[in-house]
Image: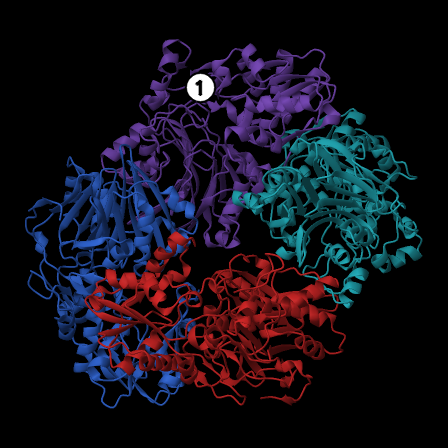
Chain colours: A purple, B cyan, C blue, D red
């Protein structure tokens, strides 16, 4: 991501993470572990859980997959109490210290509090500098710590009021879980850039998760998506819903539907698999491949779109590529020379399927293009006659600043090359992308607000809010009229407009 | 597996393992690592590599996945030399010591030798007892060690003659790799119960692997399947093919096509994915489901069969179940209570796909039936109207003794219950299996010998050879005429019938 | 230690730690490792090093002994740069998280800074509460973090001025090392409760360490002890000595001579071994044992005193007890039942030496008395006729607040029992202690200030400064006239009285 | 050790190990752990325990110190049963695999058996070759495995008779513990080269250990030393003592008294500390240092001898050197350059003691001389006026073949240099050794056999038995008359001369 950096150590860390929280449940940590297991795809670098045992908070965290961090079953048992929050963290190069693994647990002379965050705060550098200049010390290189400092600095009387005052200072994309002795707080930014939902296991047994797949894992019934600008407090008195601002809109990141979320998750009423399948159908309509013999999806993330494409095109949807199910754990040295090796260790072609055939290769996205090139080479080595690449999302041309660790535009193939150049670079017989309109129509999000409800800035340069500390990085594109910003809705007088108990 | 046990520690260990060997290649161990990565599905309990550095053999091995055992890149670097063999081992309860991890490396006063084995020797207890009674000491509880002892005891002059003499004493299923300072030996049992194939990277750079998928991974060109009764020697003088017996037939385990092998592997000319798809097609013909809305395959192993079923039945093939890609590494305590939890951690239903639908659930096999029951419950919880289970293989009724860790028949649902009982036990709306004839026709193996070329004893009780030490365990079924044996072809005078250089 | 605790997590952590720092040396981290090795006795719970590579600070730290933390040689190599500080931390029950392992490394938007601390800040709770109430967040449960917050909050212009302003707010015992891109700062409290000394390897290659033994280890020449109230800055411009206050006195903790420091260290001109030997001599004069056959010291810490006692008494100094040299690493569950086992694993009697003999058992101190009881029992089991215990320090009756993790007085045997009771409790034939006068005379510290230069509060209840946050805990004893305090010399107007370059 | 090697992998592994066994005790493994803790000095490379739970043998073993191997308390709990044997193994370069860690556990079709060995079998290569040539396979590169093979090959009827037949084929030094379902067997070679003793905890609760210090640790009462040529069987029927040969003599390795054993151990009635002190006294008589100021022993192994020297010479025995108690665990790369660093990390001089003084430095032995050189340099750097080295054992000139990993004579300084050369090489002011006569007189072993009861071959080239496979390595010295051998007493007709119950 193109990101202003005051020192090389302060980096955006919180992109594409997974959150899970539970209140009022014996074995809260065990349930949190199961919930996080369903969210492991959102972050593989590290994982942690903080539990609340009658006001005493316990923490376990570590680097690696959930199964590595909690290999010793004693660790789950250490996490006593009937409420807990957990976090899985995405791998971002160069920030590999355990001090960056969430949830953060902080100790005051009168209090303990734990925080887990998914998103990216676009005014983090400004806030951090203000905080540091007036005496704050940051132990992590993550922006997520900022909310803890703001809460600590607040002069409001109640924890909820402190949180409200603090949230109003943040800009950008954020979903937060805070665990305190008195309750589990969940908050979403005023644009709803990141998904967050609530489930229920029993009376006064609530679950909060980044995706509904984690509710299913724990057997919780879906209650509702958390709405933009909401602050939820779950405590022994039940669930209380407030708004910390009335200037809200819905702009969930389209990438959640395209790539991040699990196919069995449903976000704001739209199932991810169904949405992807529709993207594939729409892509087949927009960008057909006359004369093709069959459709091959890149496993696993593009299988839904491939199915949709095949059905719409009336072509067989074939298993031309097989994914090694052990790849998640295989160490590959990340140098340039090893990239092709990594692709070969992850995917292999089924010769008997692809040999002599003209193939529509459906993928969900292209970033640098190198992986596509290696896959196409693999298919041709296996005898494919032609490989026509169809991407079930629009071309990435702009960075995102709301919580996705996208490469800077200098590495984005589509930001720097024409379609013909790209086709040649990846050695495809043809290449085409889904249109932004097709994407929006396929997801077909119902929202009470104006607009599509989606953030599509990656594709069209239209940002639903100012990007604050990152604005300078876009100045050229702004000048060229390629990039536009909506005004910040939250800038207007924020106030708490509603408090209601329960759902 | 029903198995005679003289002590509780002597157990069959070598079922469903994966072998890889290479000769004449700088960085032999690194290539072996890549090859084994493609075979990881054949064994997750442990892995090891022995390399040959001009006559000095080096060993590294450990418990766990390949990526765990070789997490420290130094370990691969320790394995100097230009030839190597590797082994991945299947998890068998109760035999979890590192001493059972192959390849075995033994030291003589004049020699070093390493062995890797896939299969099950049916006269192992008899041979082991003979060896022990005349002074041999076994350090592992595995039968694989037997070949090393036989070779050591042989009075023949050359290593090859010693190996031949030793192989002739073995019965059952075995694929062996032996690495000695002078060459890499590969041998297959006279029935060809286990797959083993040869590839070539360059002149005098040979690769041997359990599956062709491993050849693809390393970029090797497929040369040929090793044939029943063959002993291959690869050395600096090239590849030399011999037969250690002329009494051979082909009876490869049908389970390789049904379940074990990767879909992108091809065994004796039949691609596994294509075979599975045909099993699905054949199943749809034999056991149609009128009025069904869609087909759902149990990921990942049943997706090929589901595709075939859907195509043949003219039904949509839908992603009604999603598999968690991190499950391979998640620790589940294996007690009875946790089984449902384990299934839920592995699979989840996509409500939007299955709700209100009548589903054909295609799975590759049923063993105890509990997993099926949990999946059906999951689909119904997600709103499925009906779940008709179609199994793309015949019902398991008999144990196998040629290298598969099948449960004893007391745990095999189909061995103890009628179809109606089974349907009720798993709470399906209907249940049906592929016929043995359908299985044979789907695989459609071309073999110069009589018969189908397959072992289908699990399904029909017909064993292509005597089962020696296990015979007593089948006596009731033999008496009842349920089980039959072919005579041992190898019993007749064995002789080396051919030696030819190269392929 | 009797300590006010606002929550159970905020505990004194920094007692008896070891500091080492180096500036201007290639392989600074390697040298720091060697220096810390010589200080391992001051802390076994954890260890860490931060190095400074031209302004970029690197950190490695972990739980356990130095050899555990840095087992992987790569970790030392990761610590690039030509300056570094290291810390070994004493084991304090209940504070076992890695977040408490020093040096602390903090990141600002414009700066990095690392801190290592040995001592105990007596107004820590007050300062921490002030800081937290105005918005600071503490990541560790250690008081050492306070200095970092004070520096960050300072409005002074230079780093040195910020440090001076911050140090003036601290009370109690502290030796600090701060590593910043611009220099290595070392500071000592105005009473000099903890030792800290400077050595030199070459021109502009300086070393700072808790004890001279660490200078010897690295081959550095001793330059000088850091004096109370000094702030030293070592940078590429050489060493600059300042005072941050002119109200100083010397009150080094007598326990450094009695127990903590290595015998080969010299503190303020007095070698520790020589001092201990004199304590033994003085003890023999004050508390002779007529009719004894031989002297046995408890290894290793009491061997110097035993030698002194034996020489003065004209008795043989015998090896009646042997210490197991591997005990440092042996895991003993710390429950009451295992205490005797732990003593037996650590020490054993030499029957042939002690059988039938009347023994003077010389030990350096008695805390709870249980260890003494087990040693006496062991000697009598081995046939000793009589065991006369002579303690080479006065009886512990009062807590210390300047940096020693002494048990609360409720556990101190001497605080709660008469000499006769103690003798009976430990089952000795007689028991006697060194007098406070004898202790002072044996150490015989030369100091330009009034008084002995030592803190002897443990023994006589005389505290050389107010104890601030701990005062309430002593109120009964103050009322009873048992405990007295000197006024705080630093309370008077502090000012920087001198800055001089070099030593 | 000069050792014939058929391949570079077959090396002597069993030198200076420690054995412990227990029969009839609940928590047998825990007691074995405590006993091994007292024997840790005899081997730091690896440790293992095998327990016997009513005929089922359990094994745990690993590389490193006992505290590393059994860090997880579960491992001790896994070792169920009421009898056990344990082994600590000495570090020998190049044989670092876990397969070499004892006790060895082997499985037969009808039996399990575990073996632990201390010593060196001088006809191992011959026996191993015979075994291998007739079909045996060795899994370890250790000679200790031989006994297992011999027992397995024996045609005798009872286990005891098999063991007797096997032991009679062995030559050299060996102390064996064998654990079988039916009993704990302990055997000693006919010369008693290695120590082994029996203790008793209660009726039918027996303990066997390499040193009496381990009996003390577990609270066992000393019963007797095992005598040369004895085979002890401890079972539920009590203890039965037999002789497997009547041709015995006592030739315990003098190095046990000089260096290996703990000072609190007593071997054949002679306490090790007392013996060392007498060696010091005798050395002072034979090699006085006129004009010396004080005596300094090299800690810890030479402190007894230094005390004896000081007492005899009427000089103060001072703590001029301090040993770092954490050195056991510190990683030092073993290249030549780091040797001085290693000495400095282990030892440091106390300047205040040695400055300006003429010192008698007492050490127990000199091997290569480099350590002595570094210590002398350290003392002179600390200001010592003169350093006169006195070695409390005779000069090492010949290799040993009965169980000590002595350097080959090419590295032994005394084997290749005159006294004057050695003095100069180590930069001492003078150098002198104890005489062989002085050594024998100091130990003063009472034995019913002729001779001193000691093996002093290192010093005088007189071997109490032929050295079999090693003879060729001494041929030059034999020809020169420097080396002589006694005939093998066991060569004469062996027979069991006595069987008695109990002690």
Tell me where residue D487 appears, x and y as whole percent: 60, 80
Quadrant in the picture for residue D57:
bottom right
Q: Which element carries disc 1, helix, strand or loop? A: loop
- Placement of A487 over or under A45, stated as above or below: above
Tell me where residue A266 appears, x and y as whole percent: 56, 30
> Which residue is rendered at x = 83% and y = 45% of the image?
B420
Image-based side of B354 in relation to C53, left or right? right
Say which of D51 and B212 sits in front: B212
**Does the image show residue C418?**
no
Image-based side of D5 in relation to D41, left or right? right
Say which of D86 and C214 sits in front: C214
Say which of D118 and C400 sits in front: D118
- Placement of C358 over or under D183, stated as above or below: below
Image-based side of D14 in relation to C56, left or right? right
Residue ID for mark 1: A410
Quarter the N terminus of chain A occupies: top left
């Amino acid at each position: 991501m193109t990101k202003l950096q005051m020192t090389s150590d302060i980096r955006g860390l919180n992109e594409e993470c997974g959150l899970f929280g539970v209140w009022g449940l014996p074995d809260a940590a065990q349930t949190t572990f199961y919930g996080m297991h369903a969210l492991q795809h959102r972050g593989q670098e590290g994982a942690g859980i903080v539990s609340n045992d009658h006001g005493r908070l316990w923490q376990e965290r570590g680097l690696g997959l959930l199964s590595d961090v909690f290999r010793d079953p004693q660790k789950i048992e250490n996490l006593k109490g009937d409420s807990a929050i957990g976090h899985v963290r995405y791998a971002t190069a160069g920030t590999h210290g355990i001090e960056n693994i969430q949830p953060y647990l902080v100790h005051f002379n009168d209090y303990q509090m734990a925080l887990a965050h998914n998103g990216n705060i676009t005014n983090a550098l400004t806030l951090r500098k203000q905080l540091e200049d007036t005496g704050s010390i940051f132990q992590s290189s993550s922006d997520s710590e900022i909310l803890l400092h703001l809460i600590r600095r607040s002069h409001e009387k109640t924890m909820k009021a402190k949180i409200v005052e603090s949230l109003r200072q943040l800009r950008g994309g954020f979903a937060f879980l805070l665990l305190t002795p008195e309750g589990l707080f969940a908050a979403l930014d005023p644009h709803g850039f990141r998904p967050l939902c609530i489930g229920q296991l029993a009376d006064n047994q609530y679950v909060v998760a980044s995706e509904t797949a984690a509710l299913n894992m724990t057997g919780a019934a879906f209650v509702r998506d958390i709405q933009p600008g909401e602050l939820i407090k779950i405590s022994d008195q039940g669930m209380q819903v407030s708004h910390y601002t009335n200037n809200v809109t819905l702009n969930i990141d389209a990438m959640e539907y395209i790539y991040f979320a699990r196919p069995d998750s449903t976000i704001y009423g739209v199932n991810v698999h169904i949405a992807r399948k529709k993207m594939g159908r729409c892509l087949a309509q927009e960008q057909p491949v006359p004369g093709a013999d069959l459709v091959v999806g890149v496993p696993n993330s593009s299988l839904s779109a491939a199915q949709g494409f095949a059905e719409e095109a009336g072509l067989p949807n074939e298993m031309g590529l097989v994914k090694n199910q052990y790849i998640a754990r295989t160490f590959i040295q990340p140098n340039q020379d090893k990239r092709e090796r990594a692709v070969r260790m992850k995917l292999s072609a089924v010769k008997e399927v692809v040999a002599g055939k003209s193939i529509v290769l459906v993928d969900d996205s292209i970033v640098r293009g190198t992986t596509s090139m290696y896959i196409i080479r693999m298919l041709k080595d296996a005898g494919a006659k032609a490989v026509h690449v169809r991407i079930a999302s629009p071309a990435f041309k702009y960075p995102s600043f709301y919580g996705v660790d996208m490469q800077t535009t200098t590495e984005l193939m589509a930001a720097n090359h024409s379609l013909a150049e790209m086709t040649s670079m990846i050695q495809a017989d043809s290449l085409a992308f889904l249109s932004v309109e097709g994407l929006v129509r396929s997801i077909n999000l119902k929202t009470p607000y104006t607009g599509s409800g989606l953030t599509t800035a990656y594709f069209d340069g239209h940002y639903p809010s100012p990007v604050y500390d990152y604005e300078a990085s876009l100045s050229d594109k702004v000048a060229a009229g390629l990039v536009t910003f909506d005004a910040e809705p939250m800038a207007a007088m924020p106030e708490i407009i509603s408090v209601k108990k329960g759902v």
